[in-house]
Image: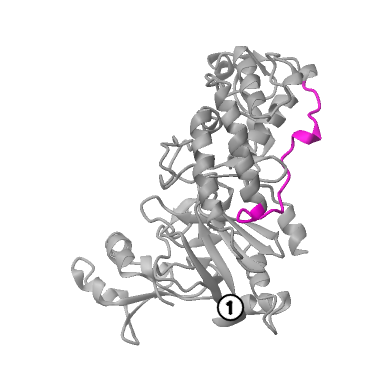
Amino acid sequence: MLKQASTARTLGFALLAGAAAFAQTASAREAAGFSQAEWAQDYASPAAMQVQRSSTPILSPQTMAATEQMVERYKDIVARGGWRPVSGADRLRVGGKGPAVAALRARLAVTGDIDAASGSSGVYDSYVAAAVKRFQARHGLSQTGSMSMATQQAMNVSADIRLKQLEVNAVRLRSYSGNLGNRFVITNIPAALVQTVENGQVVTLHAAGVGKIDRQSPIMNTKATQINFNPFWTVPASIVKKDLIPKMQKDPNYLTENKIRIFTGETEISPASVNWNSDEGTRYRYRQDSGADFNSMGIVRINIPNPHGVFMHDTNSKGVYGDDFRFISSGCVRVQNVREYITWLLKDTPGWGRDQVEQAIESGKRVDATLSTPVPVYWTYITAWATPDGLVQFRDDIYKRDGVNVPSTLSGPTPVASAEPVQTFEPGDEEN
């Protein structure tokens, strides 16, 4: 059942409603340089163009070998002149036509996203839409099948830069070529993605929220050791000073509304007794009650001991998982479908099946489950890789670690759906 639920999610994790793609007005289409085509031009796209979820782990000998082979393929593409940039295509969608469509077809053909035999028609038919969707899946973008500025920007990263990315990441993948364990977890930071791996196969796949550019998630090897159900959240001193005190100065009810309590030692004090216009507020400890709807860690925290003080957790703001841009935390990693994830982590721990996991969550009480065998966890930084089926994936070099000046293809630094309904600060390097 867990695998079925996970399989239902595609690589982009951001399937958007197709109806929205047709909401553009006629005047906007004319401004973009193309007009509406006859719907009879919309042919059925071949199933072979669809991107299937790969069961091959990002960290595996198979991925390493496929990436090294892709390096050779991209050397050939570069030697042949690469591809021409696409312009004026950012608003194209099914039914559109114009010279930009032919240029788009040519660009997609170079990287094998569309069959060159489909022709050079100036009509944006379903073959083009399927090819764009395939390209978007390979670049971690919302798989709409319609062009966007982010999609056009990704297409216009030059072939030689993509080649350099592949070469850099082939070296990274080789560094993980040893025995990583029979069961382990991969967090690929640039892809904002978590994989659970068992017997060399991906078991579950999870979108993730990872560290902001100015509060980066660290690259590290650690182990998952304990699950905290319904955790409290102790607000870190940095967030108390930068976020909490200014909020209290504007709204004296902020702490009460967000179920954050103030302690001096073990004694709780009233927010009304604190002078929020001085530094008095920095002298206390702040703890948020457990609760799936308002606690920043949601229903569960996964402890992974490390010197950076970060961990993995649920969230009370699920909307971020539908965004292309998921670099929103203070260094910790939020995990989509966290119940599935922790059930997999606990599967070899006696007394912790799916029913017990659900019971612990529904109790609303703080419950700790210690893994009988800690599970290795690898936080990695892989921006380009290939799978044995010949598919190559690229992601933004969000932390600028590739050293090859990969231009950003993300159109904005702000998540679309992930606005916090209550809180605007994130769990950081706090204690329980």
In the rendered view of the protein, which quadrant contains the C terminus? bottom left
Q: Which residues are magenta?
A: 42-61
Which residue, given by chain and number where applicable, does mark 1 sit on?
A: 364
Quick one: SS at disc 1?
Answer: loop
Q: Which of 113 and 262 lies nearest the eye of the viewer? A: 113
Residue at point 40%, 65% (across, down)? 428
Please identify the dominant SS of the magenta region. Answer: loop
Residue 112 falls within the magenta-colored stretch = no
Q: Give how far across and how far down residue 156 sits, in percent.
A: 51, 27
Q: Amino acid at mark 1?
A: Gly
Quarter of the N terminus within the rendering: bottom right
Tell me where residue 144 sits by quadrant: top right
Instruction: Write the residue at 63% across / 34% down.
Output: 135
Along the line of sight, which residue is nearer the eye, 93 or 350? 350
Number of callouts in the render? 1
Residue 375 vertical position relative to residue 129 in the rendered view, above or below: below
Q: Is residue 356 left or right of residue 157?
A: right
Q: Nearer the viewer, residue 99 or 41?
A: 99
